[in-house]
Amino acid sequence: MVLASAPGKCILFGEHAVVYGQPAVAVAIDARIQITLEESKSGWRIDDMKFDKNRHPHLDAMLKRMWIGDGGGPLSVHIDSDLFGAAGLGSSAAICSGVAAALLHLGGTPADELPLPGIATTAHLAEAEAQGGRASPIDTSTSTLGGVVMVSDKKEPQAHWQYTRDLRIDGIRRTWEVHSVDLPESISEASLVIGFSGRPGPTSQMVAKVAALLSNQPERMEDIERIGNVTRAGATALSLGNLQAVGIAMNECHRLLQGLGVSDDDLDRMVEAALPSSLGAKLTGAGGGGCMIALTTEPRRTAQAIELVGGRTMVSRLGAPGVRIENE
Ligand code: PMV
């Protein structure tokens, strides 16, 4: 039996602008997906039921790539999650990354020799396959590498380049440079409070909304470039441990995202409630529902303030460990 786990993620900076070639920064959070795999004598099983690949497209895509194609026999799979569901916290990516690690370990790879770039690549390709061919590598890379990850169309000097990912989307080859951002010890003085509105963030709808805005008002592309600049400044502030500057960049990002029309009343209410006790706060991910995040040195106070306006909360360090095997 193998037990692997992989973290969820929040986007700290750069959502929406990343669709137009700007960088984005994501952080692995202290809420994980746990994957248990064992060989099964009673056929393919998931959570003690017959495996239905239509209900588990990400798992199916991973198994085809890494197990069934190599002649592997039936498995029994259990998936447990600490993440809010359908909240933009990267649970599908964490499933892909966790399953990849578990399958490698089941096949004999030692836990301390997991090939992280290879896991991130397979997880990204499987996630894209399960989502109709579209996926940026930010979720799968953050879940695999852990910590803080920066993805950009080019190599970014304020972060450590790790690998290049590419994917053909609608016949066009897209390339992303994936980096990790090293965090100084002082960053642990602050926590991230994640507030969930309780409604899923409809990612493709919100991406289409921004596309329509930019097609009607091409001059608004300046706001996309501004988000790119804030993202680079935010990544630099993170790597220097300048929490005040990280918070300012988060607030600026939220203002720009509001201008693009992707925030909503619930997200704005939670951001406002968090601000008096926070260094900065913003929506995270696609918007139109989903989650917000606040950077704070008083996580209990901030979480209570968000809960008072109706949010569900979770507290995390800034950066959690990436995919790993739990049962050595
Ligand atoms: O909702 P999430 O966390 O999956 O984030 C979506 C991020 C967008 O930039 C809005 C879309 C994308 O593909 O990058």
Image (spheres, grey):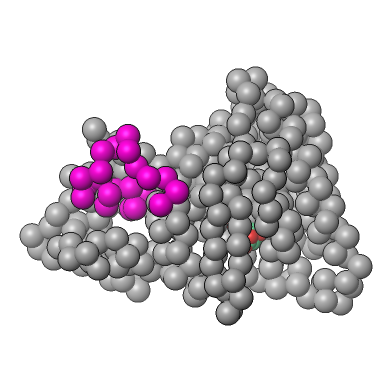
Magenta residues span 97-118
Residue 218 at what x, y percent from top left? 88, 72
71 vs 249, left or right, is left
Observer-nearest of 287 and 102: 102
3 vs 302, left or right, is left
User: Which picture quadrant has residue 204?
Assistant: bottom right
Is residue 244 in sight in this rendering? yes
Point out the image quarter for the N terminus: top left
Ligand 1 in which quarter = bottom right
Q: Residue at x 63, y 46 (%)?
A: 150
Residue 158 at what x, y percent from top left? 70, 38
Is residue 274 in sight in this rendering? no
Q: How many marks?
A: 0
Q: Is residue 67 above or below residue 132?
A: above
Q: Residue at x 40, y 42 (%)?
A: 323
Point out the image quarter for the C terminus: top left
Observer-nearest of 106 and 309: 106
User: Which picture quadrant has residue 246?
Assistant: top right
Q: Residue at x 53, y 49 (%)?
A: 163
Q: Residue at x 18, y 58 (%)?
A: 75
